[in-house]
Image: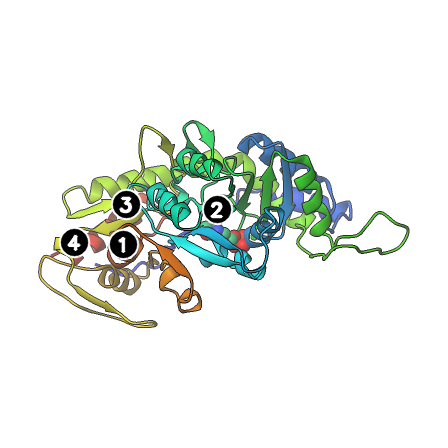
């Protein structure tokens, strides 16, 4: 098979034209700052879409998570229950506050935090007051169940919906389940501002605090008066212009991502693999990334050290690293599954709660991979990707 002339990407920004109009408006009216109509407008539109009363536009999803962790009152040495198989940004803000993440293992059903493990974690640490749950690759976690468990134990939920904007669980938008919720407009997300993020909450005072903290915590006084630690975390009105131009295209992006997922599912239906799973009765993902899990019996030998990987090809079998190399050879971008946090050297001292001896996150990391999911990928290109993957099983 020939190499793709133009690289087929995992997930890149897709612009439509309106973005430039709003950016130009910011320029022409000189609102080249962290105040302006684009910011006001996207806060309004996103709070309506997600179904939270208040939205605060921030520089990125990570700063939004940092604000959420502060709102939850997380203090040094506190333990915080966190999703384990996720991007490190879900967890880093817990450490910014000098608290200790306790990683909760993943379930096979959604590839997200396992509610049974969360229950177990509360039986070990009944005094934990904060849970940070992420929705991986656009698939909602069992959010109703997780919120119920947290509530039973008097804990506050922070929902990291960075990857799942537009997805729903039990008919409710992700990013609205937690007391404090975040979304991201990073360049690879379902809609983007090139960067940017947002905190969403129903708590008016919390939203006001974030507005204050994210603009250096100025008190209302004639001079620069400070009583609390401040941050420079507010979104720029220029970035907000890009987001404003993208919002009308959210559903269209989701439909394209879904079509990609379904074409892969069909193309691999006779292979010993499964796609990233969800419960069709409860979850409607935004299909941000299409992923593959290779059945155990179809795995060839794959060895991963901290920074390198090796595999031994075998007829009829393959492994993620073989497929990723085949994709790279053809100028297409795939990616390993997020390496679970409990396997990361920086978090090796942190506790990890799993059920029995099974380490689900490590298993999915070992057998899974993310496929090119860019919505500008043509059907022909996707057919070729499917062929490349299929050839690895020959
Ligand atoms: C699960 C998850 N959480 C948080 C973030 C952080 O968002 P940002 O890059 O906007 O800081 C990302 C993405 O980058 C993410 O994938």
Which residue matches tag 1? 368
Relative horizontal placement of residue 172, taking residue 62 as reference (left or right): left
Specify which label sits upstream in the sequence, 2 or 1: 2
Relative horizontal placement of residue 194, taking residue 172 as reference (left or right): right
Considering the numbered disc 2 on the image, is that residue within a helix, a strand or a loop? Answer: strand
Which residue matches tag 3? 108
Specify which label sits upstream in the sequence, 2 or 3: 3
Occupied quadrant, residue 328:
bottom left
Q: Quadrant of the N terminus?
A: bottom left
Which residue matches tag 4? 296
State the separation of the CA atoms marked 4 and 3. Answer: 14 Å
**Location of residue 51 in the rendering, given as x and y in whole percent from the top left corner:** 55, 30
- Residue 320 can be seen, yes or no: yes
**Location of residue 73 in the rendering, given as x and y in whole percent from the top left corner:** 61, 49
State the separation of the CA atoms marked 2 and 4. Answer: 32 Å
Considering the numbered disc 3 on the image, is that residue within a helix, a strand or a loop? Answer: loop
Specify which label sits upstream in the sequence, 4 or 3: 3
State the separation of the CA atoms marked 2 and 3. Answer: 20 Å
Disc 4 versus disc 3: nearer the observer: 3
Which residue matches tag 2? 131
Disc 1 crowd rating (10 Å Cα; few below 14, some 14-19, many 20+) is many
State the separation of the CA atoms marked 1 and 4. Answer: 11 Å
């Amino acid at each position: 098979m020939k190499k793709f002339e133009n690289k087929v990407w995992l997930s890149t920004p897709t612009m439509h034209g309106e973005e430039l109009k709003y950016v130009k408006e910011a320029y022409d009216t000189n609102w080249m700052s962290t105040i302006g109509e684009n910011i006001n407008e996207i806060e309004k539109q996103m709070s309506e879409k997600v179904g939270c009363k208040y939205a605060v536009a921030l520089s990125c999803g990570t700063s939004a998570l940092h604000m959420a962790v502060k709102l939850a009152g997380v203090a040094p040495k506190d333990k915080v229950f966190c999703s384990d198989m996720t991007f490190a940004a879900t967890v880093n803000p817990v450490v910014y506050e000098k608290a200790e993440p306790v990683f909760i293992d993943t379930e096979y059903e959604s590839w997200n935090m396992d509610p049974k493990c969360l229950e177990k974690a509360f039986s070990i640490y009944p005094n934990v007051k904060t849970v940070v749950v992420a929705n991986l690759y656009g698939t909602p976690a069992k959010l109703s169940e997780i919120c119920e468990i947290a509530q039973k134990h008097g804990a506050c939920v922070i929902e990291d919906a960075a990857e799942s904007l537009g997805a729903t669980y039990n008919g409710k938008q992700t990013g609205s389940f937690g007391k404090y919720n975040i979304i991201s407009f990073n360049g690879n997300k379902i809609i983007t501002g090139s960067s940017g993020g947002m905190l969403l909450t129903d708590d008016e005072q919390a939203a006001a605090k974030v507005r204050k903290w994210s603009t250096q915590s100025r008190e209302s006084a004639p001079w620069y008066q400070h009583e609390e630690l401040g941050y420079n975390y507010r979104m720029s009105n220029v970035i907000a212009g890009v987001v404003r131009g993208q919002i009308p295209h959210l559903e269209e992006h989701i439909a394209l991502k879904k079509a990609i997922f379904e074409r892969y599912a069909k193309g691999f239906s006779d292979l010993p693999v499964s796609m990233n799973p969800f419960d069709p009765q409860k979850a409607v993902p935004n299909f941000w990334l299409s992923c593959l899990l290779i059945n155990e019996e179809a795995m060839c030998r794959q060895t991963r050290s901290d920074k390198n990987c090796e595999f031994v090809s075998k007829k009829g079998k393959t492994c993620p690293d073989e497929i990723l190399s085949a994709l790279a050879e053809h100028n297409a971008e795939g990616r390993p599954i997020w390496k679970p946090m409990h396997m990361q050297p920086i978090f090796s001292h942190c506790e990890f709660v799993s059920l029995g001896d099974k380490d689900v996150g490590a298993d999915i990391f070992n057998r899974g991979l993310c496929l090119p999911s860019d919505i500008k990928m043509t059907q022909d290109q996707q057919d070729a990707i499917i062929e490349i993957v299929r050839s690895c099983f020959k």
